[in-house]
Image (spheres, rainbow, N blue to C red):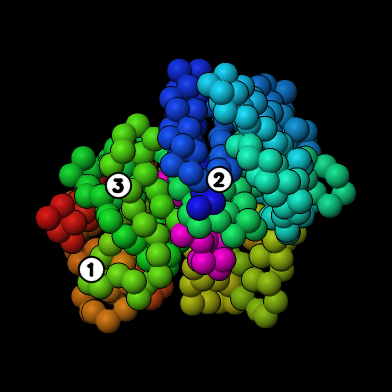
Amino acid sequence: MLIVQKYGGTSVGNVERIDAVAARVIESKKAGHDLVVVVSAMSGETNKLLEFAGFFSQTPNHREVDMLLSSGERVTSALLAIALEAKGYPAVSMSGRRAGIVTDTIHTKARIEYIDTTEMKKTLDEGKIIVVAGFQGVSDNGEVTTLGRGGSDLSAVAVAGALEADLCEIYTDVDGVYTTDPRIEPKAKKLDKISYEEMLELASLGAKVLQSRSVELAKKLNVNLVTRSSFNHHEGTLITKEENIMEQPLVSGIALDKNQARVTLRGVTDKPGIAAEIFQKLADCNVNVDMIIQNVGYDGTTNLGFTVPQNELEVTKQAMSELKASEIMQYDSDIVKVSVVGVGMKSHSGVACKAFSTMAKEGINIEMISTSEIKISMVIQAKYGELAVRALHSAYQLDK
Ligand code: ADP
Ligand code: ASP
Ligand code: MG
């Protein structure tokens, strides 16, 4: 089999951990598999590098940020290759460029356009283990790019897809995907299987165990995706097609997104084209707008609210002030988004009502609501985030 294994930040957090990862990789190699290993930077490293940049500027040049951040993954890829060779297993580390990962030119959140697998295939044919520096690629004009936070998951899935690997294993610091973050609710249960659709919702709503774009790509390319722990040999969670899961629970999980900020524009002129103008401006700055709520107009004006990732709030503020979209603009980073996800809700009523009454029982005010076929999201005050997660987890009996 050809297996792509990805090891996250904690799993390669120091040289002893890298040594343990090397041993684990060798186990698979001895079992007769071909291996491409994708690694993250050591845990905390990417944040540390960002802090360094922040010492000089709140809005550092994105090309330079990519040069800076991509170094973290290069360090661990080279160290793992050295560790493997020291144990007698030929290995070659590759930067994103060497691995042929070609992206667009949107620095700090580039999208992969294609992967030229020539070099990787040649190296595999020589019987060597490949260690790819995750989270990075090279743009079609030759610049180093990075794929957005948590992007090593995406590197792994994309490489698995391009090489038509039999399996893509994401090794992390928990046993798999749980009904909610086990660090918030210790009663959370590990799921044996979850559908791509639900995993995609959970991931994009804050469950960082998998990066959302990696799930999207795994679904598209039909990659066999498993998350499991690098610290033990427990079976992990299989992310698979909905039809492969016999009993669909009503609700599969609860997610918490602490990285959101809310923008409120009051007294926006209520006429055709205004919303288009506002969101075009944000799109031009590559801001990822999420929940959008517009009130019914009154007296020729309306109020418009939306959320953006916290680290895109500065650009958003700048864009809004240039546009002079409204007289009163409010920004609030002290909020979180809590979400209930489950494909079973498609065919059941009362799921949303239970979420709202649970918040009421805890005395938590819901400030924004949005729903889709398989999720309910609520914006609430940040200080209630973890309480809300635990209350919802228990209300939907996910601990049972
Ligand atoms: P890595 O560095 O291996 O990529 P991450 O820190 O990105 O690991 O993701 C793993 C973390 O995701 C876990 O430690 C856990 O706290 C968090 N997490 C959030 N939601 C969930 C969930 N539903 N199931 C499992 N882990 C979750
Ligand atoms: N090191 C990067 C990050 O911290 C990418 C990753 O770990 O997946 O976001
Ligand atoms: Mg991660």
Q: Position of residue 3 (x, y in %)?
A: 51, 49
Confirm whether the magenta stretch covers residue 77. Answer: no
Q: Which residue is nearer to you in this view: 233 or 302?
A: 233
Mark 1: which amino acid? Pro
Q: Is residue 74 left or right of residue 119?
A: left
Q: Position of residue 238 (x, y in %)?
A: 36, 57
Label 1 Cα crowd, 10 Å radius (few <14 / some 14-19 / many 20+): few
| Nearer to us: label 2 or label 3 | 2
The part of the image, by quadrant, that contains residue 129 is: top right
Numbered range of the magenta stretch: 209-224
Q: Position of residue 152 (x, y in %)?
A: 57, 43
**Residue visible at 51% across and 66% down in the picture:** 222
Q: Which label sits on residue 249?
A: 1
Q: Which residue is nearer to you in this view: 335 or 272?
A: 335
Q: Is residue 249 among what the camera can see?
A: yes
Look at mark 2 in the image and give the residue it sits on.
34
Q: Is residue 107 among what the camera can see?
A: no
Look at mark 3 in the image and give the residue it sits on.
235
Q: Position of residue 75 (x, y in %)?
A: 64, 25
The part of the image, by quadrant, that contains residue 233 is: top left
**In the figure, 358 relative to 51: above or below?**
below
Badge 1 element: loop
Q: Which residue is nearer to you in this view: 225 or 111?
A: 225
Badge 3 element: loop
Q: Is residue 73 left or right of residue 28?
A: right
| Nearer to us: label 1 or label 2 | 2
Disc with the residue nearer the chain's start (1 vs 2): 2
